[in-house]
Amino acid sequence: MQAAPITSWIKKRRWPLIVFAVALLPRLVFVLTTSDQPLYRANVADAYEYEVLADRILAGDLGAGREVFFHSSAGYPYILALVWAVFGKSLLAARLIQVLAGALNAVVLLLLARRLFGGETEGDRRRGEIVGRIAGLGAALYGYIAFLELDLLMTAYELLAINLGLLWLVKFLDERRWRHLVGAGLAFGFASLGRPNVWLVAVVLAVFIIFVLWRRWKWKALRALGAGALVVGLCFALILPVTLRNAVTADDPVLLTSNAGVNLWIGNNENATGYWGVPGDMRDRLFEASRKRAEAASGRVLKPSEVSTWWMERAGAFIVKNPVRALGLFGKKALLFFNAYEMPNHLDYYFVRARGGWALWLMPLGFWLVMPLGLTGLILWRPWGDKHRLIAVFVILYFLMVVGLFVTGRYRAPVVGPLIPFAAWALYDLWGKLRGKDRRGLGKTVLVLVPAAVLVNWGVWHTAEAAYSWGVLAEACDRLEDSEGAVRALEEAVREEPDNPFFYNNLGLHAQARGDLEEAERLLREGYEFSGKNPDNAANLAQVLAQRGKEGEAVTVLQDALAMDPRHTGCLSNLAAVYFRLGRPDVALAYVEESLRWGGGAPQTYSLAVYACLSLGRTDRAEGYMNQGLALFPEDQGLWATKAQLLLSTGDLDGAREALRRARELTGDDPRLGPLAAQLGP
């Protein structure tokens, strides 16, 4: 009895189900065949930051720390936390959920194409159905989008939400039902939690809707305004909790995230290239480095919103002072935007595909095909209706937003979805002209398609350095505690880019960890020289110099670094350690306190403060620093070992034994634990 309704339901939705399956299968193959690869066993860069925030949420810190969110996807840590709360912490589980979102996105684009190119007549409906099928299959087999969807960033959910928002607005223009505006507002709000610029998309498209309703459909002005306000209001309703969270926990009511200013500067400065690129000392941790530069220039501690404003002002000053250079840079970025090469700023599509990601070849379509066909469809489609104008407004707006910053494949990805229906129609139209031997029509198509194909596929403006990807792979190996794999990757990186101080620095740290201090000094010294004696490199070099008994040179290196950056907490802490080794606990304590003043509160810094105070006979101050350190780092084994030594020095043997027991329960292999156990006994 129930078989017939089920069969009928499947038959009516046959093509959406086919598209879903075609999208799902190669994505599953990619996830499962790369699950043993270091880049997919450990998170790196932005993805690692989201993992850390998700862990905080799962541990009960619903605010995910006390800093304003910096990385773009303020909502993604909460999505990860939800997935891991249900399935347990598993990178594979998170990716499998994103596989479903990616497959569903292909279905959404099928439905969007039907709406855009269908109509009232039988012929129009037939056209819409065929174009929808082509669009859905094209989205299902678009390899780069699938690659982005399966990285542990919010891209899969962002693209799905953006395309859903566009679909609901198109449905509203077709049917004029308010519920579609509700869906669009919520979709754009959700997408804004991953891409903070989407709220601007919601505002502009709401203005477009208001104009259409008022001027073309003759709605009363108040009613038309209400329709637009519904979209914008619901969008901001989803954003508001993040704004309130930033205001309450960080005393800085940033709308979503605080990286807008530095991103604008990256794309608009004297050395800007049009793609992602920052000075060497800013590559590793952009948030801390950008804040440090802004605070050093301002001479005071800045809130994240003030840091963002400072960078925005630098970008604005460059544009005002160099209008010709800025205009040329804009033109270069426009060409980069249309170029087929998928520029990375996280994982590199081509690097992954060549090293274990062979399943991406199962999805061969890409920007090289969709952009020329999409431009052809946008230009040749007639008659244009309000729903087609809506998509054109979105594409133009997003183009301007990306080119206003800098170009990467991930940043321009939202444009691909709405272009796929136009690309599908262009194929449908081309096939019709070929079958009908419409030479005049074919001539028009060729006049548009060939220049578009040349624009997109003529050469490559810039390719990512292989060294970048080897460095990312080394980071993944470090997360997995695969030191040998990390060293091999770093050595490959050095071969590709032999003057990069970052790689020498990390190779030196690996040599230090395995006890080869002579090799560590050589590598760190090369990194120090290549970096222009950067304070970050100076801090690491000085530490090894001190270990090798070269305290005098270590002091010189650190003092030179502090002359460049007096607030560099690593140099301050290391200089304190050197002076402590030299028997100057008073000087050491002064540098430790200066480091803590500027935010250098690493566990080792608090341990050093305790030792310096004990050497000076200031037990009360030692206990104060001990308590501060443990309040900030309650799970640090080294601090508990330090506490055991502190209590032992004061004669509190029971307290020392308890601290030692706690240290042994924590992860680590602190060398002090054995001697402490021998002193304290059973």
Image (cartoon, rainbow, N blue to C red):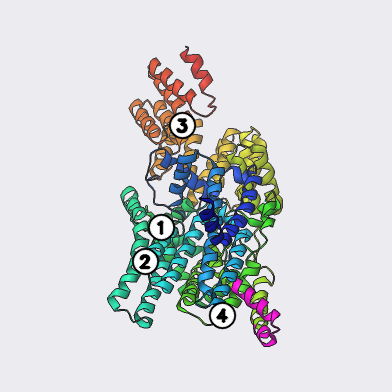
Above or below residue 214? Residue 19 is above
Task: Give the residue number, with chain letter if any, for mark 2.
Answer: 231
Tell me the mark number nearer the camera, choosing from 2 and 4: 4
Q: Where residue 160 sits in the image (x, y, percent)?
A: 50, 59
Q: Main secondary structure of the magenta part?
A: helix
The region drawn magenta spans 424-444
Q: Residues within 10 Å of mark 4 (few under 14, many from 20)?
A: some
Q: Examine the rendering and report whether any part of residue 535 can be seen.
A: no
How far, Cα to Cα, is label 1 from label 4?
46 Å
SS category of the residue bearing label 2: helix
- Magenta-span inclusion, residue 125: no
Tell me the mark number nearer the camera, choosing from 4 and 3: 4
Q: Nearer the viewer, residue 542 or 137?
A: 137
Task: Give the residue number, with chain letter if any, for mark 4.
Answer: 381
Task: Give the residue number, with chain letter if any, for mark 1.
Answer: 307
- Pick whichever of labels 4 and 3 is earlier in the sequence: 4
Indicate the amino acid at tag 3. Asp
- Pick whichever of labels 2 and 4 is earlier in the sequence: 2
